Image (cartoon, helix red, strand yellow):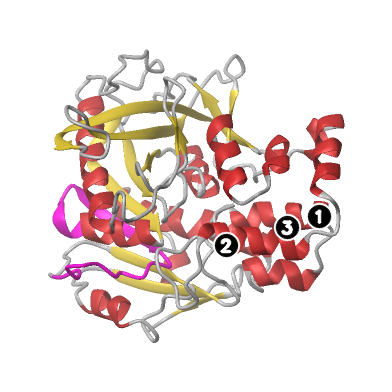
Amino acid sequence: MTTTPFTSRKAMTRRSVLGAALAAGTTVPLAAVADRAAASSATARLMLPVPTGPHPVGMVELHLVDRSRPDDLAGPGHFREVMATVWYPARDVQRYPVAPWMPAGALQAFLADAGFSDLAPLGPLSAGHAGAPVRQPGRRLPVVMFSHGAHSHQGDHTVMVQELASHGYAAVTVAHQYDTYTEFPDGRIAVPVDDEQAPTRPGDFAADLRFVLDCVEQLAAGGNPDVDHRELPAGLLGALDPRRMGAFGWSKGGTATACATLADERIRAGLSLDSPMQMNPPLTGDLDRPFMMMSAEFTRATDPAVAAFWSHLRDWRLNIQAQGAVHVSYGDNEALFPQVAKLLGWSRQQLQDVIGTLDPDQAVKIQQAYPLAFFDKHLRRRRGHLLDGPSPAFPAVTFLP
């Protein structure tokens, strides 16, 4: 449940919004919720929607080090370190465990920072089976990179990521060190640090994305980029298609996606989820590849940086907005917060104060359908009509001229 924008008119932070939302809505003591979860974990655990694609999903974590970028905060001899996760269509998944939404240590730190450690037993499971063999479709898998928002984590858009994987994509999520919650193979738990300690800007996120693209190319060539040389799932080496790579991101991660797409022609299509497009120096230059924006609070009408970026899009472009959506609406929040609200006895208004007035079920279907349609169109050259104009299946979605 991520509630942190990179920047906001209300100066929100992830900690203050999550904490305030839960505190204001709590009518059932958190300890009682934890006891209920412990007594009946199978029914109390939060749930993510099942992907709609025809394939089961596998996943594997990668520990990556970019030796071209020294890490001064970590000390002499250290370099930029990131965790990444590859999600992919799998086969024979029964023998492979289902992965959690977040690693246990990272989830505990994430909730503790908001003052709600008692919710940790409710952490949801994903649809991804850790280490399952890759399905061999006869053609290499198109690749889509994901960049999270500020003070967030790489699992906060798992609904979208596992949806893409279930439809035949390799989706690679990146944990941006010093601005994320993640867990390293040696047990270290990474948490966001103060910007004065380690300023991690959209340009740094974009550099991470471009480095992970290098790692994808290494995987495609049959090499293992994991610095610990851990065994990879059967069939992963050589399975990814470096000629069909796209990227998407939320908030700060969407700005990073725009930055990386402008700088790197390997990204053939880019998608931003309610991103402010604010950078220093500003985003400049024309983009000659497809780009789509899903807007909520950061719109072209209200944010000059968003409007300026739009004006430089020279290829196929599309800007849609779901009525009633707020900044956190294009993500797992729409699936998870209604369940938390039910457990904690929130009113309808208290829930809407957090996730907006967009119907949560409709919101989940929107984030499953529109990114898939976009990448299908531009990475797979598949014909479809969802992006042509308003659809009766999604009445909340408007197409902005």
Q: Is residue 135 left or right of residue 201?
A: right
Q: Position of residue 232 (x, y in %)?
A: 37, 17
Amino acid type, mark 2 = Ser
Q: In this figure, what is the number of numbered marks?
A: 3
Tell me if label 2 and label 1 are in contact, CB under 8 Å: no
Is 142 drawn above or below residue 135 in the view shown?
Answer: below
* Residue extending farthest bottom: 301
Q: Nearer the viewer, mark 3 or mark 1?
A: 1
**The C terminus: image quadrant:** bottom left
Say which amino acid is labelled 1: Leu
Q: Is residue 259 at all visible to an observer of this figure?
A: yes
Frontmost of labels 2 and 1 is: 2
Residues packed near mark 2 inside 10 Å, few (<14), some (14 to 19) or many (20 plus): some
Q: Earlier in the sequence, mark 2 or mark 1?
A: 2
Task: Report the disc number at residue 344.
Answer: 1
- The residue identified by callout 3 is 338
Magenta span: 261-284
**SS label for mark 1:** helix
Q: Nearer the viewer, residue 108 or 44?
A: 108
Res. 237 mark: none
Q: Earlier in the sequence, mark 2 or mark 3?
A: 2
Task: Give me the C-alpha separation between circle 2 and circle 1.
Answer: 18 Å
Q: Please name whichever residue, 107 or 57, is drawn nearer the observer in this view of the structure.
A: 107
Kind of residue at badge 3: Pro
Tag 1: Cα neighbours inside 10 Å, few (<14), some, or many (≥20)? some
Q: Residues within 10 Å of mark 3 (few under 14, many from 20)?
A: many
**Residue marked by disc 2:** 16
Q: CA distance from mark 3 to mark 1?
A: 10 Å
- Identified at 43% across, 60% down, the residue is 384
Q: Residue at x 52, y 44 (%)?
A: 158
Residue 394's x, y, as percent?
59, 69
